[in-house]
Image (cartoon, helix red, strand yellow):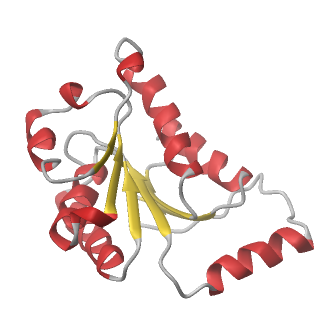
Amino acid sequence: MASFEPSASATIPTVDELAQELLLIQQSGPRRVAIIGTRNLPLTHQQLVEMLSYALVLSGNQVVTSGGANGCNMAVIKGGQRANPDRLEIILPQTIAQQPADVQDLMIGVKHIVEYPDRRNMTLADASKLCNHEIIDRSQQIICFLYHTSHTLLESVSYAKERRKIVTSFYLD
């Protein structure tokens, strides 16, 4: 069951920070929305993430995600591709060649792909952490699907909150 849980270590924002967040929430125009999450996503949740990505893109938003095997990121790519590949941005932790073949095939037609050959020899966990930070830095709003044991994603959510991004976390356990 998914749930929303505020961070126990959240700091109290200043009035200026709250005003900035309120302004962002009230803006009616398109946003840059990051969707990141676990690879261990059940099929029904994958379908929901795909529909969410599809709806966000159809609403004129730019959706930003990473690559990866089956799971959240692949579902985001499928939904964004179906709606409008021009409104989808994929930031890879490493290179296209290091993605599974089915993900490489899925990325065909996506114009906005960023890859990092210099991270080729990094562990996937280290490269993913850097990738998630970049995705968060490029976005106004972050949606994350994770488990309470998803260390890299938990750190990414914390990073996003420190930068006063709008963060929605869906815990899958």
Residue drawn where x is 26% and y is 39% of the image: 68
Say left or right for 11 vs 93: right
Looking at the image, which residue sits at the far right? 15
Front residue of 144 and 81: 81
Q: Quadrant of the N terminus?
A: bottom left
Say left or right for 101 vs 134: left
Residue drawn where x is 63% and y is 81% of the image: 25
**Residue 23, horizontal then vertical, whole percent:** 71, 81
**Residue 118, horizontal then vertical, whole percent:** 41, 17
Front residue of 111 and 28: 111
Image label count: 0
Location of residue 133 with respect to 97 vertically, above or below? below
Residue drawn where x is 20% and y is 73% of the image: 83
**Residue 103, horizontal then vertical, whole percent:** 15, 42
Quarter of the view holding residue 93: top left
Let me know if residue 133 appears in the view.
yes
Location of residue 103 with respect to 140 vertically, above or below? above
Let me know if residue 149 appears in the view.
no
Quarter of the view holding residue 48: bottom left
Say left or right for 15 vs 36: right
Residue drawn where x is 29% and y is 43% of the image: 39
Location of residue 31 with respect to 71 vertically, above or below? below
Q: Quadrant of the C terminus?
A: bottom left
**Residue 123, horizontal then vertical, whole percent:** 40, 17
